[in-house]
Image (cartoon, rainbow, N blue to C red):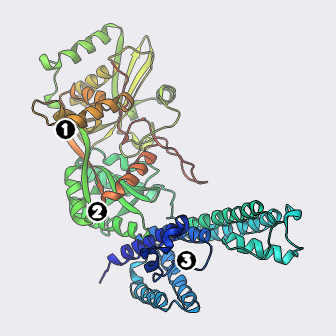
Amino acid sequence: MRRSWIPAAAGYAATAIGLLDIGKAVFPRFGHSRMGEWSDLLPGIVTTVAGASSLVIGVMLVMIAHALRRGKVRAWRAVVALLPAGAAMSVIHLHLAAAAVSLALLAALVAGRREFSALPDPRSRWRALGNLLVLGAFDVGLGYLIVSARPRALTGAPGPFDRLEHVVLGLAGVEGPVAFTSARVSGLVYFSLLALGTLTAVSTLYLALRPSRPVAELSEEDEARLRALLARHGERDSLGYFALRRDKSVLFSPSGKAAVAYRVVSGVMLASGDPIGDREAWPAAIRAFMTEARRHAWVPAVIGCGETAGEVWTREAGMSALEIGDEAVVEVAGFTLEGRAMRNVRQMVNRVERLGYTCRVGRAAELTDEERERVKQAADAWRGTQTERGYSMALGRFGDPADAGCLVTTAHKDGELKAVLHFVPWGPHGISLDLMRRDRAADPGLNELLIVRTLQAAPALGITQVSLNFAMFRAALARGERLGAGPVLRAWRGLLVFLSHWFQIESLYRFNAKFRPIWEPRFVVYPNARDLPRIGLSALQAEAFITLGRRRGERVSRPWWPGPLGKPLALWRS
């Protein structure tokens, strides 16, 4: 029987004890208060060593607490090793009640050891040990120099072993046998040694407890299996083809009939879109995903899934869902340039064509090697940022022979390439926009021309529906401008309009709305509200809006479009 409350209880207890330790170190009067006296009964509360040492121990306890809440086995082992030592120290100092509490907690943790099964990164053990040995040796050497730097300030003539003992104790925040004639020098040496010891202890603990960071890579075998699933069930989700990004990993259901594509970013196991494959096998794939997340103490999350998939995720995984925007889907059969509602698009398309622009629409397989290379070079030259962005709704490559079914629409003027759209397959009769890029010097309205000509050419290519851009918070923008909208909704819309000066939220919604699409909501699925900031940060990292240092050997993502959630978001104003 699972007792999932045990890791959370252990983590919160460690947090409370760590904060009390920090409080005693930072606020000396706190130790003499009623709560301070009562806290002496708790294990881990430092009462016999210097206040600075208490501060270090408190910080380390708070770090361990996070790992305990995640059910990490190394954190459990550390606490199980420390509690008996703490009980022995309490007995030595005649704090029998604190010793009894420590032993009771030890028994509870041992009884609940099965709940602490999250595996750490196997490489972090040696990195933590190497960090401890290297920094420890450096600290001892530098500390010895600090203690000996001012021989005139030393009281008496302490020998090398006395100085070495002073350094080792000082790294732990405890005064050693060496005395100084100046209180200023004594304080400087004390806090210098403490800083070195704190840096070594905190960095070693971080390396030992941090979650594993696997290099996401789609193997040839997994890609072949995914393509087989997409061939049978690809029409279910317009984002399904993006699971073929080669910087994603994939987990299959035991039957192999469904799969979830993901990447681990900053401790978050980030899936995107709906599960791939037979809907009846989705629950098994989701359970495999959640099991893997628990094994490594990753935070499970999904970005950009549809409503049906969101319902399955929340039911099977016990998570919550939050609507983050809408995908614009155009039904080809109902699209027309006729009517008053389409007058703006119609006039813009006609004006751009009168300027001499022409469009070509065809499958990627029809491009010659020369044309393919020219499109790639032009798209790179037109990219608005140095860092390629995209993850959940971007393929990350162009012209791969395996992607022969993709659709390419190009615009030309006087024989020169001026703009390109790239669509990936959405089942046998749909396409989903992956790339939208144009020459910055081209005339306004070129994007509208490309989309219109793609929609008009779609019937001859057997295409019945086209997925365009993703519009963040589209529903809030639409409802906030309606008659009768309340003050909260209007304020939320006003904030989004203000942010649109930097993130083009409103302009993308307006652009999408020109083509009279069907709006399909997309959701983020998350375990707890407190995890949302971390999930948001990991999503920004995955989409390359935040670029942190990568490990050696980690593949650098090369998506095509700099837009949140991968779909084209930053459009040039027309």
Q: Name which residue lies at 33% across and 22% down.
A: 447
Eye-nearest disc, 1 or 3: 3
Dot 1 or dot 3, earlier in sequence: 3
Q: Give the amino acid type for the residue marked by disc 2 in the picture.
A: Lys
Dot 1 or dot 2, earlier in sequence: 2
Q: Percent position (x, y) of residue 339?
A: 11, 17
User: Which residue ends up furthest to the top in the rendered image?
Assistant: 354
Alpha carbons under labels 1 and 3: distance apart:
51 Å
Q: Are marks 1 and 2 in contact (CB under 8 Å)?
A: no
Q: Give the amino acid type for the residue marked by disc 1 in the picture.
A: Leu
Quarter occupied by the C terminus: top left
For residue 319, what is the image quadrant?
bottom left
Q: Are marks 1 and 3 in contact (CB under 8 Å)?
A: no
Alpha carbons under labels 3 and 2: distance apart:
56 Å
Q: Which residue is mark 1?
A: 489
Q: Is residue 346 above or below residue 49?
A: above
Q: Residues within 10 Å of mark 3 (few under 14, many from 20)?
A: many
Q: Is residue 74 left or right of residue 131?
A: left
Q: Is residue 508 above or below residue 359?
A: below
Q: Which residue is mark 2?
A: 257
Q: Work out whether residue 218 or residue 351 is closer to the camera in this orientation and state it.
A: 351
Eye-nearest disc, 1 or 2: 1
Q: Which residue is mark 3?
A: 46
- Asked which secondary structure carries label 2, the reply is loop
On the question of residue 331 being in view, the answer is no
Q: Is residue 66 left or right of residue 226?
A: right
Q: Percent position (x, y) of residue 573?
A: 35, 21
